[in-house]
């Protein structure tokens, strides 16, 4: 059969009916000559879709509506008739140059008595674009899922939990290739124990139909444990039927948990020694104090390293840190595993122990003192330290943790007041003493504001001519209810709470103001405490007191003790030199009571050495004290310093000191501390009242 026999003969059809059907058909159609490839007839839909006019179609071939790269394919299809009787995908060109994606169907026909081809066109541009968009979206979603930093997986719960999705992050977490996971179940991937855990979790999440969150440790395929945080949820279906798939999102939080654990450890432990810190200690005591009973008590011990600041300042912070670490190590070795050692800060440690029966606690405290006796090696140099210990027992002394810690602190304070290198148990009297100190602190603040402090003056006699050389200003507190309070009852408390600084400034101003009105040859001596030397305002306060009063600097004597050097020698020496450059005289007080007076004499040229009263008592009969007196005279002569003896109470003591060559003396024999009015009466009445 030839083509004309197989072709549908349009010539036999009613021309009007064909033309009407052809022209109005919604699909673009045309008839073309397979030999010349020219359009023979096109319908309205083809004109509308492609934008060519009928006159343009009459001059065109079917190749003209195709891009260049598809024309050869078209020629081959026409020649081989491969585009006949089946749909073919093509790219066509509109008159505007826009490309169309179409599906064409060709059929051989007879048109006007000759062979022709009828082409029916379906515009697939929008459909294909939609397909591409769906494909691109799916590809993008796949890429997003694969590149998410968290693991994502989907299981088909209707198929034994078989994995439908398993992204790269998930694979990295468990240590498997995604291709090896998709299509298999947990039974293939994990051991029985892990399988049971996952199955139970999946079942809970699937039945609950809500998100569940969990965190657990699992082993990777290489045996490395990892901590996973996972959320699971059954995926709802669009038609509202029972869910089939389970979505899981997992994150490896191993490093995060490690950092959190490290931060938690740091928050509760001392960075230097590794011991529990104050926060950890407080939590421990709060818990243990509630559990303590008369049958099973606990003891809280506060421990301070004595004179640690001196080591820290003289040898440097590195040496101080090394000392604290060695102290921590010794304390840790001393306690049992059930006990606690903590560092509360600075040189303060705390212990919680349970050896509180049959003298066990006293023995433990003694061992604690002894464990610090061997020298500490600080970069090749041996250093010896002692400690002070305060002890409170629960429930005997307190059942409340805060009260127990306060009582231990009070006992520690008592141990320090007892001379250090000892221990003290809490006693109720300690709390009463603390309350007394607290009350005195409040009253001292009020006394400073209301002018209740006053100065007494004790005369200083010059032995070379038995004349008055000046006075030492001594602080007194005239309390409105308790009368005159001696300095030993309030000065130590003022030094503890820092009030000694403003009080000391008032003493300086008042002493200088008073002495400025005296005869020019008389001096005024003022004692300065360690706390004042630590304060940066001391030099400015001295200068201000001199300027305000008009007192000549050489008439002011500043008296200090060796404790000034123990506090901070690097700060003290420059300050002393600055004071001396002003013309102020500097005296070392209580000489002989410290352990290193001679080294200070070499470090600083003192103007006066005041021998402590303890060496004057018994000078008449004690050859040892007399030898010390003679030595001090020699030292003063060697350092070109005035020597003064305190505490002269008998005529015989006075004559001994005169005979030994002392320059100046003080004591009740020569005059007790007296109010300003009596001191000025002594000045103007002459020395008859002093030495008779």
Image (tube, rainbow, N blue to C red):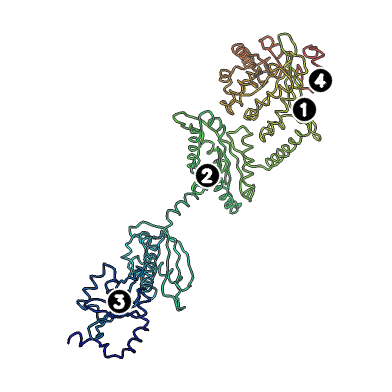
Q: Position of residue 335 (x, y in %)?
A: 50, 44
**First reached walking from the N terminus: tag 2 or tag 1:** 2
Q: Residues within 10 Å of mark 1 (few under 14, many from 20)?
A: some
Q: Nearer the viewer, residue 313 or 41?
A: 41
**First reached walking from the N terminus: tag 3 or tag 4:** 3
Camera-nearest label, 3 or 1: 3
Residue found 25% across the figure and 78% down from its top: 83
* CA gap, disc 2 and disc 1: 48 Å
Q: Which residue is mark 3?
A: 58
Q: Which residue is mark 4?
A: 678
Q: Position of residue 140 (x, y in %)?
A: 38, 64
Q: Position of residue 580 (x, y in %)?
A: 63, 18
* CA gap, disc 3 and disc 2: 105 Å
* CA gap, disc 3 and disc 4: 141 Å
Q: Residues within 10 Å of mark 3 (few under 14, many from 20)?
A: some
In the displayed structure, would residue 337 be above or below residue 50? above
Label 4–label 1 contact, CB within 8 A: no
Residue found 22% across the figure and 83% down from its top: 115
Label 2–label 4 contact, CB within 8 A: no
Q: Which residue is mark 2?
A: 341
- Label 4's element? helix
**First reached walking from the N terminus: tag 2 or tag 4:** 2
**First reached walking from the N terminus: tag 3 or tag 2:** 3
- Label 1's element? strand
Camera-nearest label, 2 or 1: 1
Is residue 579 left or right of 363 when viewed as pictured?
right
Camera-nearest label, 3 or 4: 3
Q: Residues within 10 Å of mark 2 (few under 14, many from 20)?
A: many
């Amino acid at each position: 059969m030839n083509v004309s026999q197989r072709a549908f003969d349009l010539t036999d059809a009613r021309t009007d009916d064909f033309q009407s059907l052809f022209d109005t058909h919604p699909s673009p159609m045309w008839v073309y000559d397979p030999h010349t490839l020219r359009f023979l007839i096109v319908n309205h839909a083809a004109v509308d879709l492609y934008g060519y006019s009928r006159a343009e179609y009459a001059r065109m071939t079917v190749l003209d509506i195709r891009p260049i790269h598809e024309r050869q394919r078209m020629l081959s299809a026409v020649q081989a008739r491969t585009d006949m009787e089946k749909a073919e995908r093509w790219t066509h060109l509109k008159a505007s140059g826009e490309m169309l994606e179409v599906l064409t169907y060709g059929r051989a026909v007879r048109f006007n008595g000759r062979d022709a081809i009828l082409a029916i066109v379906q515009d697939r541009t929008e459909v294909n674009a939609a397909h591409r968009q769906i494909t691109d979206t799916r590809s993008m979603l796949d890429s997003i899922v694969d590149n998410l930093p968290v693991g994502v997986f989907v299981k088909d719960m209707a198929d034994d939990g078989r994995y439908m999705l398993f992204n790269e992050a998930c694979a990295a977490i468990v240590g498997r290739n995604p291709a090896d996971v998709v299509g298999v179940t947990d039974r293939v991937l994990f051991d029985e124990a892990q399988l049971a855990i996952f199955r139970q979790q999946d079942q809970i999440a699937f039945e609950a139909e809500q998100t569940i969150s969990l965190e657990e440790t699992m082993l990777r395929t290489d045996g490395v444990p990892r901590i996973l945080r996972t959320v699971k949820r059954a995926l709802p279906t669009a038609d509202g039927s029972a869910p089939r798939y389970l979505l899981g999102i997992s994150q490896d939080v191993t490093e995060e948990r490690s950092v959190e654990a490290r931060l938690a450890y740091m928050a509760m432990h001392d960075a230097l020694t590794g011991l529990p810190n104050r926060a950890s200690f407080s939590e421990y005591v709060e818990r243990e104090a509630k559990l303590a009973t008369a049958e099973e008590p606990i003891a809280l011990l506060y421990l301070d390293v004595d004179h640690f600041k001196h080591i820290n300042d003289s040898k440097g912070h590195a040496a101080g840190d090394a000392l604290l670490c060695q102290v921590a190590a010794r304390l840790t070795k001393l306690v049992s595993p059930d006990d606690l050692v903590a560092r509360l800060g600075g040189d303060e440690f705390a212990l919680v122990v349970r050896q509180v029966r049959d003298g066990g606690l006293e023995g433990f405290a003694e061992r604690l003192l002894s464990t610090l006796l061997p020298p500490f090696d600080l970069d090749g140099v041996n250093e010896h330290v002692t400690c002070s210990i305060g002890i409170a027992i629960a429930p005997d002394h307190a059942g409340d943790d805060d009260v127990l810690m306060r009582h231990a602190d009070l006992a520690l304070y008592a141990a320090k007041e007892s001379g250090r290198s000892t221990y003290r148990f809490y006693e109720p009297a300690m709390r009463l003493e603390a309350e007394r100190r607290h009350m005195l602190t409040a009253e001292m603040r009020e006394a400073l504001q209301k002018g209740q402090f006053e100065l007494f003056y004790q005369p200083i006699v010059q032995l070379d001519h038995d004349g008055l050389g000046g006075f030492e200003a001594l602080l007194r507190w005239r309390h409105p209810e308790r009368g005159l309070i001696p300095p030993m009852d309030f000065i130590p408390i003022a030094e503890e709470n820092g009030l000694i600084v403003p009080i000391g400034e008032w003493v300086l101003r008042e002493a200088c103001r008073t002495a400025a009105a005296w005869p020019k040859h008389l001096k005024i001596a003022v004692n300065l405490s360690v706390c004042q030397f630590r304060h940066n305002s001391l030099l400015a306060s001295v200068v201000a007191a001199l300027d305000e009063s008009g007192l000549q600097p050489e008439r002011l004597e500043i008296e200090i003790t060796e404790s000034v050097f123990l506090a901070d020698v690097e700060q003290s020496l420059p300050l002393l030199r600055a004071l001396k450059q002003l013309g102020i005289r500097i005296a070392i007080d209580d000489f002989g009571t410290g352990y290193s007076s001679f080294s200070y004499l070499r470090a600083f040229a003192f103007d006066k050495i005041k021998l402590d009263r303890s060496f004057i008592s018994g000078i008449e009969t004690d050859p040892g004290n007399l030898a010390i007196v003679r030595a001090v005279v020699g030292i003063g002569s060697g350092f070109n310093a005035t020597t003064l003896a305190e505490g002269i109470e008998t005529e015989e003591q006075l004559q001994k000191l005169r005979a030994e060559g002392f320059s100046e003396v003080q004591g009740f024999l020569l005059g007790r501390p007296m109010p300003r009015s009596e001191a000025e009466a002594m000045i103007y009445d002459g020395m008859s009242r002093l030495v008779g």
